[in-house]
Image (cartoon, rainbow, N blue to C red):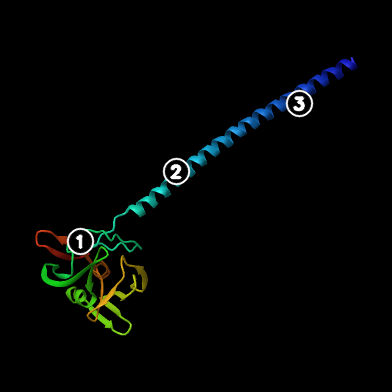
C-alpha cells in the first residue's frame, strides 16, 4: 500500500511538473507572440514616422521660392520668373495709390531701395552710410538690413533673406518681398497693369 502510494505520488508529481513545464512553454510562446506583435507595431510606427519625416524633408527641399514672397528660410531660386530682366522703374500700387520705384533683378529676387520702399509704404527709413545699414520702421515693426549680408533683424530676431542686400546710390537695396512683408504688406504682380501691388496684410 505504501509503495503504491509512493508510485501514485511520483506519477502525480511527474504529471504536475510536465503540465507546469508545458504551460510555461505555452506561456513563453504566447509572450514571444506578444513581443513579436509589439515589435511589429513599433516597427510599423517607426516606419510611418520615418516616412513622415522624409516627406517633410522632401516638402522643404521642393517648396518653391518666389520673388514676391518672403519664406524666412535660408533658400533661394535664382531661376525665378521675374517681371523684368534688367534694372528699371516699375509701377507700384499701394492700397490703391499708384507710384513708381526703381527695381534691380538679382539672383531671382527683385531688389528695391530701403529708403524708397519705406516712403511708398508710409514708413520711416534711416541709412547709415559708414556701416551700410538701413533701418525701416512702421508702427511697432522694425527691419534692419546690412549691405553684403543675407540676414536681417526683423523685430530684433535674426532672419535669413533669399539673397544678399547691396548698396547702390547711398541706399541699401533689398528684396522687395522682405521689405514689404516685414512692414506688413503682401506683394503681388498685376499682369494687366504691368505693376507691382502692395496690399496691407
Residue under label 3, please give it. 17
* Label number found at residue 82: 1
Give how far apart the Cα atoms at labels 3 and 1 are: 85 Å
Which of discs 3 and 2 lies nearer the camera? The answer is: 2
In the figure, residue 151 lies in which quadrant?
bottom left
Front one among 139 and 175: 175
Q: Earlier in the sequence, mark 1 or mark 2?
A: 2
Which of discs 3 and 1 lies nearer the camera? The answer is: 1
Residue drawn at x 33%, y 52% as measured from the top left: 62
Give how far apart the Cα atoms at labels 1 and 2 are: 40 Å
Residue drawn at x 30%, y 80% as measured from the top left: 132
Extreme-bottom residue of the structure: 130
SS of the residue under disc 2? helix
Front one among 145 and 102: 102
* Label number found at residue 48: 2
Q: Residues within 10 Å of mark 1 (few under 14, many from 20)?
A: some
Q: Position of residue 158 (x, y in %)?
A: 37, 71
Amino acid at each position: 500500500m505504501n509503495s503504491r502510494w509512493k508510485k501514485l505520488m511520483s506519477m502525480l508529481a511527474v504529471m504536475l511538473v510536465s503540465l507546469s513545464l508545458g504551460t510555461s512553454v505555452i506561456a513563453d510562446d504566447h509572450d514571444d507572440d506578444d513581443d513579436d506583435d509589439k515589435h511589429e507595431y513599433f516597427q510599423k510606427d517607426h516606419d510611418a514616422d520615418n516616412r513622415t519625416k522624409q516627406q517633410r524633408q522632401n516638402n522643404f527641399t521642393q517648396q518653391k521660392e518666389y520673388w514676391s514672397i518672403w519664406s524666412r528660410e535660408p533658400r533661394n531660386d535664382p531661376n525665378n520668373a521675374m517681371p523684368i530682366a534688367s534694372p528699371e522703374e516699375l509701377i507700384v500700387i499701394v492700397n490703391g495709390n499708384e507710384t513708381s520705384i526703381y527695381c534691380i533683378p538679382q539672383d531671382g529676387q527683385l531688389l528695391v531701395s530701403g529708403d524708397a520702399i519705406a516712403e511708398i509704404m508710409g514708413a520711416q527709413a534711416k541709412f547709415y552710410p559708414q556701416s551700410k545699414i538701413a533701418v525701416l520702421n512702421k508702427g511697432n515693426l522694425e527691419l534692419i538690413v546690412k549691405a553684403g549680408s543675407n540676414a536681417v533683424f526683423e523685430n530684433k530676431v535674426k532672419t535669413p533673406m533669399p539673397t544678399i542686400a547691396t548698396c547702390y546710390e547711398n541706399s541699401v537695396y533689398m528684396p522687395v518681398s522682405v521689405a514689404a512683408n516685414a512692414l506688413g504688406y503682401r506683394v503681388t504682380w498685376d499682369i494687366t497693369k504691368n505693376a507691382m501691388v502692395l496690399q496691407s496684410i
